[in-house]
Amino acid sequence: MPQTSRVIAVTNQKGGVGKTTTAINLAAGLALSGHATLLVDLDPQGNTTSGLGLKQRATETRTVYHALTTDPMGAPGQYVMLTSVDRLALVPATRDLTGAEIELISMPDRERRLKDLVDGLRDRFEYIVIDCPPSLGLLTLNGLVAADSVLIPLHCEFFALEGLADLVGTMRRVRGAYNPTLDIEGVLLTMYDERTNLGQQVARDVRDFFKDKVFTTVIPRNVRLGEAPSHGVPGVVYDARSRGAEAYLALAREVIERTTRPTAA
Ligand SMILES: Nc1ncnc2c1ncn2[C@@H]1O[C@H](COP(=O)(O)OP(=O)(O)OP(=O)(O)O)[C@@H](O)[C@H]1O
Ligand SMILES: [Mg+2]
């Protein structure tokens, strides 16, 4: 199985663009499609952890914070917890993770700590999805170094493309220094509202700019996706027939297709 394992970092340093919603629902969609999938919560906000109803349990277990800051980190499996979705596991995060940015600075191989964890789990999972925080700091750097590819959610609004040059620049530096094969999995249009001209215009602009890197699947604005986290389950489980859930299930199919397609250089 290791040869098919794919590590996808969901990243955009802009806040509130749908990273966590995408990480949770893509990972759950992959798991529901029969693939062993691991979600890694790399955000001190812990929204992926709480969105899966595991916030309390995460305070009683070893989290991504311990994995990043314990040297040696020990067996990777000790950081993994089960979720209520079959075939979906989680490396949780709590508020402690805020401190990791500072503690990591003095650690050897501080950019490669998450990679060590993730590589140690590749033989158990076909997909590993990392939910990055809204910044380009040391945590996100760890995510990009650990990943095979990045998935960039873009909120369909006026400033959608703002700051992307910084992300592209960071990816270039990561490729140069740590991870030469880091790929773009795809750009995902999120919270799309087809009724607005602005949404349509932004979608056109993004496709002009990123061409075939943009997923065919577009995630609509859908209230059920927003409600699901408070019930502690992914949107694709909470209301599988909602438009939002259908879109994320289609995204999972698209990712599976892209994974099995030979990648361009
Ligand atoms: N397609 C959607 N339709 C409706 N609401 C959505 C949708 N996607 C995300 N949301 C809601 O928008 C808010 C921001 O989404 P989310 O937390 O996924 O963004 P984020 O990029 O992870 O944010 P942060 O940068 O703070 O980590 C959340 O309240 C979420 O429930
Ligand atoms: Mg988030």
Image (cartoon, rainbow, N blue to C red):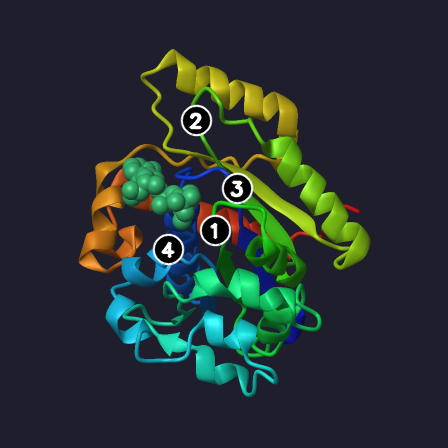
| Mark 4, residue position | 45
* Quadrant housing residue 43: bottom left
**x%, y% of residue 86?**
33, 71
Whole-angstrom CA distance, mark 2 to mark 4, is 23 Å
The residue identified by callout 1 is 133
Residue ID for mark 2: 156
- The reply to whether residue 117 is in sight is yes
- Between label 3 and label 2, give the one nearer the viewer: 3
Q: Is the distance from the Cβ of mark 4 to the nearest ligand 1 atom less than 8 Å?
A: yes
Disc 3 to disc 2: CB gap under 8 Å: no
Q: Earlier in the sequence, mark 3 or mark 1?
A: 3
The residue at 55%/62% (across/down) is: 102
Q: Are marks 4 and 1 in contact (CB under 8 Å)?
A: yes
Count how many numbered circles sit on residues in the image: 4
Calculate the distance from the C-alpha at mark 3 to the C-alpha at mark 1. 7 Å
| Image coordinates for residue 21, horizontal then vertical, percent | 37, 48
The nearer-to-camera label among 1 and 2 is 1
What SS does tag 2 mark? loop
Give the Cα separation between the discs numbered 4 and 1.
Answer: 8 Å
Q: For the residues labelled 4 and 3, say whether their Cβ atoms are less than 8 Å apart.
A: no
